[in-house]
Image: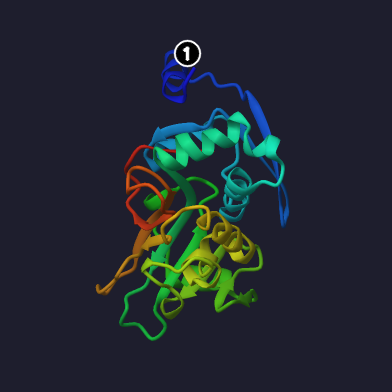
Amino acid sequence: MNQEVRTSKMKELGGVWTPETNWQVPTTNGEAVFVFPAFGPNNYDEAVRQVLANGQRLPTGEQDAFMLNESYNSADNAIKESPRTKFVRENIMHDGWLWVPQVNIWTPRKVRNPGMYSVFDENGEGLAKERSVVELEDRLNGGSTERGVRFSTDRRVAFAPLNTITAGAHNKGTLSQDGAFIAVYGVEGAEKLDAVAKVFSLKPYSWIVDNDSDKLIQSLFALGGGRLLGDGRLSADFDSNGNGRVKIY
């Protein structure tokens, strides 16, 4: 049964969902378990609601990056050719987008140190919750700085200065030096995305928010790599409003 039919059947059964496969993916910070079937396709709010309503936790950006790298570059051919990794490559990345549960908060360009805050949306609040610079800076207090990006001690909040962020096409191998990718995926996760981007024929590409207003602008994030934008490119949408029909674990 394909994912769209299975999703329809779940709705008919009142949302009954049972994991068919547990995929254990090693990461820098321990093992992450991804479950199938994936939730979606749907907009951000509905996708994360389904995940949380079924007792699952939302993955961090770093966990997503390690999962994607295993899907495209696993040294174990049995994993690389398994139905679950083919599903990730063909059904999710090629045919749609993968929501990453991070909320990005863009400061006005005119402030003294403009940039992008990125917050792990573990409770699925999305754009409904307003966040302030005071709150975010308080969470960053006492954290560390890696490759120009500041991280909170719990790694749930990051800040990338605008001068570390590049929009448009990126040379392959440079995502691990880009502030926006590091803020969302962490240093190790951004390195894994560099490895994923090398699989595609074209250069990776990203869209960001150009905030020329006087207020903070919040956005969501999705990653794709297929026919919606033309084959052969890893594409990162840092300025999503949360609409669109994409899948999430």
Q: Is residue 150 left or right of residue 77?
A: left
Q: Give the quarter of the image for residue 188.
A: bottom right
Residue 138 x/y as whole percent: 55, 72
Q: How is the image coloured?
A: rainbow
Horizontal side, residue 112 vs residue 135: left or right = left
Q: Which residue is outermost to the top?
A: 13
- Farthest residue toward the bottom? 112
Q: Residue at x 55, y 79 (%)?
A: 148
Q: Nearer the viewer, residue 134 or 209?
A: 209
Per the image, the residue denoted by label 1 is 13
111 vs 78, nearest the viewer: 78
Q: Is residue 55 at least partly visible in the picture?
A: no
* Residue 127 to residue 218: above or below: above
Q: Is residue 64 visible?
A: yes
Give me the residue at 72% from left, 57% from top.
Answer: 28
Q: How far from the left and from the top, in percent, is residue 158?
A: 54, 68
In the picture, the quarter occupied by the C terminus is top right
* Number of disc labels: 1
Q: Quick one: SS at disc 1?
A: loop
Question: Looking at the picture, which amino acid does disc 1 mark?
Answer: Leu
In terms of depth relative to the viewer, which is nearer, 177 or 58?
Answer: 177
Q: Say which of 207 and 159 sits in front.
A: 207
Vertical placement of 23 versus 177: above or below?
above
Q: Name the residue at 37% across, 39% down.
A: 43
